[in-house]
Amino acid sequence: MFAGNFTRMKGRFSFWLIGSTFVLALCLLWSGCSTKKADTGKTVFRYNDATGITNLDPAFSRDQSHNWVCQQLYNGLVELDSNLIVRPSIASNWSISDDLTTYLFTLRKDVYFTENKLFINSNKSRLSARLVTAKDMVFSLQRLVDPELASPGSWVMNSVVKAADGQLTGVRALNDSTVEIQLNGPNPAFLSLLAMPYCSVVPQEVVRYYGNEFGRNPCGTGPFKLAFWKENVRLILHRNEHYFEVLNGQSLPFLDAVEISFINDKQSAFIEFLKGNLDLLSGLDPSYKDELLTASGELQPRHRGKFRLQTLPYLNTEYLGIVVDTQAASTTNSPLRIPAVRQALSYGFDRASMMLYLRNNMATPGIYGFVPPGLPSFLADTSIGYSYNPDKSLELLKEAGFPNGKGLPEIVLSTTSSYLDLCEFIKSQWEAIGINVKIDVNQAAVHRKMVAEQKLTFFRGSWIADYPDAENYLSLFYSSNAAPAGPNYTHYSNPEFDRLFQTALRAANDSERFALYRQMDAIVMHEAPVIVLYYDKVVRLTGKNISGLPVNAMNNLLLKYVRKSSDL
């Protein structure tokens, strides 16, 4: 996943302006409540989304903002736990054939869609909720590849058997509670793919009735359901009283509601968090990182009694990408076409200092491979990566024909404003060893488009895992995935890498597959089509009155387990 501001006063004003709307929405469900939040007797979890939400159809859940909401509204056959292990969800169990191509899922018989006016029984009476059947699951997965829907998640079904016209024939309902999925070949990551929000179950009749407007009228099986939504203002979810999961004998979820605000100025949102108006702060913005954390990444002493800090490796690798296609016009005269120059750049800056001074150690220096910590196939071996070694950089520059950088043309590095501080740090250290660098700053959307179209020879990029398997990262270097059709933005091509990639898909077990992944990672690092900067970390702060919020390396938001001791 290749990853305008309000003023602070305006951010405050927006909370006052829309506060009455929120209270009204709560009162519609809970009659008799007063206008004071504390008097409702209900627990409401509040967080802010700075980017906005435009669609609540899981088939269009392509980024974290939409994933977080869809994880509250929907379920799929399986889900990921805190250790990224695939666990049952709507499917109570499953089996896989010996040739690893046929999956058989048995569905629970107590999963219901939330109430909807379209649910009626054989007597034409309206149902308060409707049982999920295997046909719903088949419909939901087949829908992903419908060209009229144009879901960005259609690729998830690439390994499933299809007819010549592209119809998904490999998904069948054998009876009301059994789903069979046939693959066109082994795919060890397939179960993890099914845990993505794209693969959530949706009710056939509701989707057909609303058509393209289903994303405004969602109906799912999740722990919460939509209660109120005004785009770019506020979104409110209420507890789903029909939810099927229990924990220690208690029905989930424990919360009564979830409230999402859309303040796009991160500093204003931070102030609301400090005031207790938000229960969660996710990520670390430079505008407030030093207020929250010490230089070494600890919570500042003045905040330790009020907030709880959660950190762990995040499946996100930040890097600099280099187009290495020697046939491309943009690389004809580029010194970056020479592997030794790329290697010299990788040795030429201090990642550890960069993380300490610019990220408060809230990331791991990128001194290993491209595959990040948090995945079982991660190899904590610095011999395949690059640590700071300016003498080695000078040696490589001389080998490439540029002693002390003499004769080396100016290198243009393209980035976005959010990463300008990092790029300027790197530039200063490269220039100290004779490498002249110019930094171009692009608007984020323009930058992503130019990268996809190979209009940038040297660019800042990031890769956030779509699913927890190293194949997702290594696919960026598989020659058949060359952009713009695939995620190979560097146009890297290596026959041995491609052979290992195909072999890994057919590996008999995880140990064999992980060994192949590490071989591929080592090949990429040696040829250096990318320069790894750092591996990100999940950073979350909550109030001390919040408990039970799990966190994993995919940075999923699972609010069904959360308890809030009081509604501040």
Image (cartoon, rainbow, N blue to C red):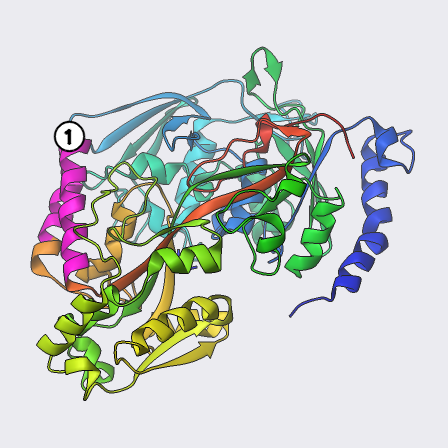
| Viewer-proximal residue among 178 and 524 | 524
Residue 551: percent from left, percent from top = 49, 35
Q: Secondary structure at mark 1?
A: loop
Identify which residue is drawn at 17% across, 52% down: 384
Dominant secondary structure, magenta = helix
Residue 323 to residue 264: above or below: below
Q: Nearer the viewer, residue 452 or 323?
A: 323
Numbered circles on residues, count: 1
Picture quarter containing residue 245? top right
Q: Is residue 525 magenta?
A: yes
**Residue found 72% across the figure and 29% down from its top:** 256
Is any part of residue 396 visible from this angle?
A: yes
| Image coords of residue 90 (percent x, y) | 46, 26
Residue type at tag 1: Asp
Q: Relative to residue 5, is residue 505 depicted above or below? A: above
The residue drawn where x is 50% and y is 74% is: 443
- Residue 232 falls left or right of residue 500: right
* Left or right for 411, reference 248: left
Identify the residue at horizontal 46%, vertical 49% (top origin): 362
Residue occupied by mark 1: 99
Q: Estimate how packed mark 1 is, as few (under 14), some (14 to 19) or many (20 or more) residues with alpha carbons within 10 Å.
A: few
Chain part drawn in magenta:
499-526
Location of the N terminus (image quadrant)? bottom left
**Quadrant in which residue 512 is drawn:** top left
x then y, percent, for residue 8? 75, 62
Give yes or no for residue 485 being in the magenta stretch.
no
**Percent position (x, y) of residue 470?**
27, 45
Depth check, front residue: 424 or 250: 424
